[in-house]
């Protein structure tokens, strides 16, 4: 079927099988539109919330109407993943100014994960195996190439690619998810190692450093993320130093 087929919605009383409802305006569906709506659902609620019935309800059509565009739910998940990966831009890396490149990679990855924080939890929520398309391979290959060309070994570059995903995904789910939904009167649970409320609740636990840390300035999520990048850059600097020393020792 064509991707831009018009679907007219039928009275909710007795609808023919697979017919769209006629109690709303005409809706133009496409694979791209289904994938985007699926991404919005899984991004905020997780993959368990994505069903063909839920997706059809979002568009005001019957579930059977969706099968004019996709074969099954697994294909819908694949479309959502493809749109999720398409959010990340193709970055131009400069090995001379590699610190800026590392920072750009972290910020771009965070931006994509933050927009749809639960879309990256496919392996946790789903038993089905979905291949997301070539975009992920392209993105990973670019970062690997950048890390190797700036002086890391392939093994180190591979570890740093894994670290990039762990760093950003962990931060988005643990920190950004809280800050982006935080009410104005909600206490800050992440700016300090141990929140003041917890320390006050257990006064019998000796925690002098945690108490002193309460005097440090409160940080927002952007400032906390800059710490993540800084620590990773320091780790890469050390690896580059060791690699240089090893090369000098072999000469």
Image (cartoon, helix red, strand yellow):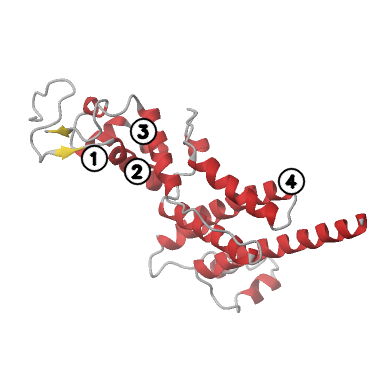
Q: Is residue 26 left or right of residue 154?
A: left
Q: Is residue 134 left or right of residue 63?
A: right
Find the distance from the CA under tag 4 to the CA under tag 2: 37 Å
Vertical comparison of 217 with 178: above or below:
below
Question: Considering the numbered disc 4 on the image, is that residue within a helix, a strand or a loop?
Answer: helix
Find the distance from the CA under tag 3 to the CA under tag 2: 12 Å
Residue 187 at x, y = what percent?
A: 47, 68
Q: Which residue is mark 1?
A: 58
Q: Which residue is mark 3?
A: 76
Q: Is residue 94 left or right of residue 59?
A: right
Question: Considering the numbered disc 1 on the image, is that residue within a helix, a strand or a loop?
Answer: helix
**Badge 3, how many Cα within 10 Å: few under 14, some, many 20+?**
many
Q: Which residue is mark 4?
A: 155
Q: Residue at x 10, y 39 (%)?
A: 24
Residue 25 at x, y = what percent?
A: 10, 41
Q: Is residue 223 visible?
A: yes
Q: Nearer the viewer, mark 3 or mark 4?
A: 4
Residue 244 at x, y = what percent?
A: 82, 60
- Return the disc, 1 or 3, that comes first in the chain's sequence: 1
Any mark on residue 41, and which? 2
Vertical comparison of 247 with 22: above or below:
below
Question: Considering the numbered disc 3 on the image, is that residue within a helix, a strand or a loop?
Answer: helix
- Return the disc, 4 or 2, that comes first in the chain's sequence: 2
């Amino acid at each position: 079927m064509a991707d831009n087929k018009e679907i007219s919605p039928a009275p909710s009383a007795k609808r023919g099988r697979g017919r769209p409802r006629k109690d709303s305006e005409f809706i133009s569906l496409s694979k791209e539109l289904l994938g985007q709506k699926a991404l919005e659902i899984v991004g905020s609620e997780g993959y368990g919330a994505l069903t063909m019935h839920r997706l059809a309800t979002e568009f005001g059509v019957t579930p059977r109407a969706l099968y004019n565009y996709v074969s099954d739910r697994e294909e819908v998940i694949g479309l959502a993943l493809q749109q999720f990966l398409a959010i990340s831009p193709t970055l131009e890396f400069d090995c001379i100014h590699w610190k800026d490149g590392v920072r750009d990679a972290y910020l771009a990855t965070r931006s994509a994960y933050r927009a749809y924080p639960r879309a990256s939890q496919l392996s946790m929520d789903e038993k089905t195996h979905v291949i997301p398309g070539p975009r992920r391979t392209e993105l990973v290959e670019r970062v690997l190439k950048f890390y190797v060309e700036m002086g890391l070994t392939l093994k180190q570059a591979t570890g740093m690619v894994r670290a990039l995903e762990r760093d950003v995904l962990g931060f988005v789910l643990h920190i950004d998810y809280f800050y982006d939904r935080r009410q104005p009167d909600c206490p800050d649970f992440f700016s300090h190692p141990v929140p003041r409320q917890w320390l006050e609740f257990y006064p019998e636990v000796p925690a002098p450093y945690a108490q002193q840390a309460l005097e440090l300035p409160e940080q927002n999520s952007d400032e906390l993320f800059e710490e993540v990048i800084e620590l990773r850059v320091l780790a890469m600097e050390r690896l580059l130093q060791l690699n240089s020393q090893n090369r000098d020792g072999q000469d």
